[in-house]
Image: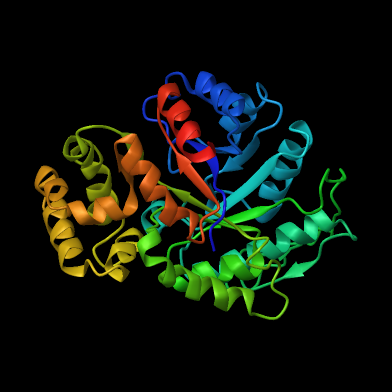
Amino acid sequence: MRHELRLGLNVGYWSKGPPPGALESVREAERLGFDSIWTAEAYGSDALTPLAWWGASTQRIRLGTGIVQISARTPAATAMAAMTLDHLSGGRLVLGLGVSGPQVVEGWYGQPFAKPLGRMREYIGVLREIWARRGPVVHEGPHYQLPYRGGQGLPEPTGLGKPLKSSIHPLREEIPIFLAAEGPKNIAMAAELCDGWLAIFYSPNHDDLYSRALSEGFGRPGARRTPETFEVAATVPLIVTDDPAAAMDAVRPMYALYFGGMGARTANFHANVPIRMGYEAEVRQIQELYLSGKKEEAAAAVPARLIEELTLIGSREEIRDKLEAWRESSVTTLLISGDRQTLRTAAELVLG
């Protein structure tokens, strides 16, 4: 069913330092009617600090983490940060969560990666327990303990820990949670437990791949949302150009990195997305080239057709036509990046 689309500004990762002109872009996005801004973290800058810094210069736009990695913080630490930022922003926080991957989780955070779906389910449960503030939090799960009790080879507790209740009342008990998900099981869990899904690679031409997983989640007992009240925010490169081939070449290295170089050959969740779309042979070639150090050749091997499915590249008229497929899809918000002129063009094309 056709629906209107919202826009979000994806500020993204830092490189050597803050993205140049980020604050001006955030202000421009709010002026243009964008619904949200999103910050990221991997193993450098964190997602929460920039969101608070730039969000302080705005009044209306929603502030999203895209994403907070759950291995970086205990559930209680994330619950505290979310309540704090939600208060400071007047109730504008959207808490985007994700599990990241084994290279970052085990290599950077020094945490085990096993059973990521189970850990995420439990993590979200603890967040909601803390925000509900019904009483001191007591949680005994396979991944998290409040208070800490030790056992199963863990260090012995002091015995002095006691159940605690948040010292502050949350501004909103129901702080929205969006889940970054790529696999069907994770997407289904987003529909079951969360208020939205963050999709990093999405093709409206394959909406059935996602809608089946979403429907499964909505159909589970106690599902939090319905399809009508659930949000899907999809990252999509939007480039207005009269030279689409050159624009495709500009984004090829990014897709080669994600599909070929992120994670290990046997554990790349990003690569599984185009594989499900029918590009398995092409993805295997990209991985082989990238992991052999042939990054330029890997980029050149990213099929033009795949890029066309995942992006909005072309003239204004071509993009306007392509947007119809997105309006018929499960997506409710397009997350884009770019300079202020790109934001203005996106607002004209998407918001009318």
Question: Is 104 on the left-hand or right-hand side of 94?
Answer: left
| Residue situated in front as seen by the camera: 41 or 93 | 93
Q: Is residue 175 left or right of residue 262?
A: right
* Residue sitting at x 67%, y 55%: 75
Q: Nearer the viewer, residue 274 or 17?
A: 274
The answer to which image quadrant residue 156 occupies is bottom right
Please state the horizontal and vertical placement of residue 9, each as a whole percent of the image. 51, 35
Residue depicted at x 42% and y 34%: 337
Q: Considering only vertical position in the picture, is 88 above or below 294? A: above
Asked whether the viewer can see residue 157, the reply is no
> Residue 134: image x %, image y %?
90, 60
The image position of residue 91, as x and y in percent, is: 76, 39
Q: Residue furthest right?
A: 135
Image quadrant where residue 106 sits: bottom left
- In the rendered view, would you say 16 is above or below 72? above
Q: Residue at x 50, y 68 (%)?
A: 186
Q: Is residue 72 left or right of residue 307?
A: right
Where is residue 13, by image quadrant? top left
Q: Is residue 71 visible?
A: yes
Quadrant of the image for the N terminus? Answer: bottom right
Colouring scheme, one of rainbow, by chain, secondary structure, one colour: rainbow
Q: Position of residue 250 (x, y in %)?
A: 22, 36
Label count reads 0
Residue 225 position (above or below residue 90): below
Is residue 183 shown above or below 49?
A: below
